[in-house]
Image (spheres, rainbow, N blue to C red):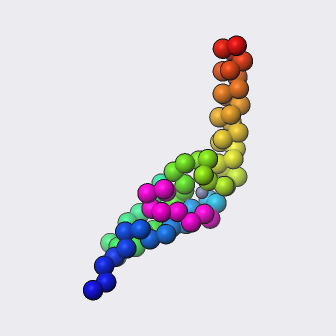
Amino acid sequence: MIKPSMSKTLTCSRCGCKREAYELNGVNLTSTGWDDDSRAICKRLVDCHSAEADEAINWLLDALDDDNEDAA
Ligand SMILES: [Zn+2]
């Protein structure tokens, strides 16, 4: 008996990394039981190697730097 795999490796549509379904956002489970990863993106931005994620992380780091200067 073949049972559907719940841990099929999916691909981030932004950076192309192989991920488990639980590591991705935007995965659609289709009626055929296949996960549609055409819009999947890494849940953790730091794990995503796309340009979009890099930009977002740089923006966050800049914001954190500003906070640190204010606190010091
Ligand atoms: Zn990614």
- Please determine whether, in this image, residue 32 is positioned above or below residue 62: below
In percent of width and height, residue 21 lies at 45, 62
| Residue 55 picture quarter | top right
Q: Residue at x 56, y 66 (%)?
A: 18
Drawn side of residue 21 relative to residue 61, left or right = left
Find the magenta span and give its range. Answer: 16-24
Q: Nearer the viewer, residue 26 or 24?
A: 24
In percent of width and height, residue 14 lies at 62, 59
Q: Residue at x 37, y 73 (%)?
A: 5
> Which quarter of the figure is the C terminus placed in?
top right
Q: Nearer the viewer, residue 28 or 66?
A: 66
In percent of width and height, residue 16 lies at 62, 65
Residue 13 visible to an observer of this rendering:
no
Q: Residue at x 70, y 39 (%)?
A: 58
Drawn side of residue 4 relative to residue 8, left or right = left
64 part of magenta stretch: no
Q: Residue at x 52, y 63 (%)?
A: 19
In percent of width and height, residue 30 lies at 37, 69
- Please determine whether, in this image, residue 72 is positioned above or below residue 53: above
Residue 68 visible to an observer of this rendering:
yes
> Which quarter of the figure is the N terminus placed in?
bottom left
Q: Nearer the viewer, residue 6 or 54?
A: 6
Question: Quadrant location of ligand 1?
Answer: bottom right
